[in-house]
Amino acid sequence: MTTRQILSRIGQALIVLLITYTVAFFLLSALPSDAVQSRFGDPALGLSQAEIDAIREEMGVDKPLMVQYFTALGGFLTGNFGNSTQSGAPVATLIADALPHTLILAACAIGLAIIVAVLVAFLATLPGLGGIATFFRGLPSLMVSLPGFWIGILLIQVFSFQLGWVRIIEPGSVEGLILPTLTLAVPMTAPLIQVLIRSIDETQSRPFVQAVRARGASESWIFWRTILRNSLLPTLTMAGLLFGELVGGAVVTETVFGRTGLGYMTAQAVANRDTPVLLAVVLIAATSYIIINLVVDLLYPVLDPRLRPSSTNRPASRTTSTAAPTASSEERTVRS
């Protein structure tokens, strides 16, 4: 990807972020709710309506909607996300405290999902396994149908309450990651397996794979050295999409396990109608989604030399067949 293309993608990303923020702001503003009234209208607090109106004026929520929009947008551009209507704390501070926990959970979950997807795809496409391969091919349909909250509750019941292997109350930093990572990884693994198996099936039918197999290489060698490398691009795309959606999955997972993080904070903000926090979470989710997909695009030429800019300068007669160079390279490796 050239510098011009990268700058173009960054410009598109900024436009997407602006549209996302605008849509989220007006949708949240249209909800039949009042965060100030919900927070301070409790009779137990003993506040009069005049005092509540003064709080509303201090927070700026009594101004016209367009004035609130541009004020909030200017604050976001300068890194000022405002204050939480529930706790009064700066939203930036709340995000800074919660985001690292969610990023660690997301990284562990996507890493585990990729490892499991590769192993299952290997067993599902390895010739000669018969019913075992059929079982692993049908496994994604089962995994994708399991609700995340049900997986979390089942894991807690079995591994924490029944077996006592993992503490759910006051666990250690590593111990507290085990069950949430499994809960978040299961539904993510299913689409990765499906895409990878489909890509492997297409790659196995290509002539260069048949040429390597004819040289006497083992199926395991062919898979790990030839087929997998040429089947990763669709899986990498899917992994980027899934990583961008992890905030939604973290809401359920962190709520089930009572884990501090962006997902748990989002659930609390929804319950308390905390609009500044929700806007910040939406913008962070959109930003992470855009960054991850940009990184995926940059990794394409690294995994596939045919996508590198230098390949466009080759004569057409030499670029009409992309399988032949790979096949001859693998044949030389097997022959040696």
Image: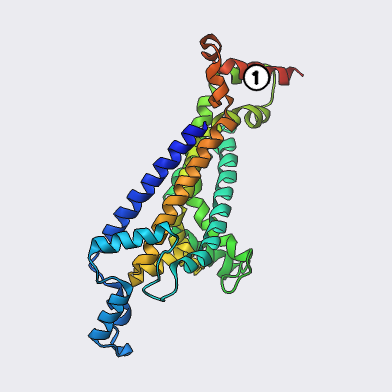
For residue 117, say whether it is visible.
yes
Q: Position of residue 187 (x, y in %)?
A: 47, 50
Residue at position x 27%, y 85% in the image: 51
Q: Is residue 9 above or below residue 320?
A: below
Q: Position of residue 116 (x, y in %)?
A: 58, 45
Q: Position of residue 86 (x, y in %)?
A: 38, 75
Q: Secondary structure at mark 1?
A: helix
Residue at position x 59%, y 74% in the image: 170
- Disc 1 marks a residue whose amino acid type is Val
Q: Is residue 245 above or below residue 257?
A: above
Residue at position x 28%, y 76% in the image: 56
Q: Left or right of 286: which side holds 116? A: right
Q: Left or right of 315: which side holds 268? A: left
Q: Position of residue 185 (x, y in %)?
A: 52, 52
Q: Is residue 243 above or below residue 330?
A: below
Residue at position x 25%, y 72% in the image: 62
Most extreme residue toward the top is 317
Reading the image, the residue beneath label 1 is 212
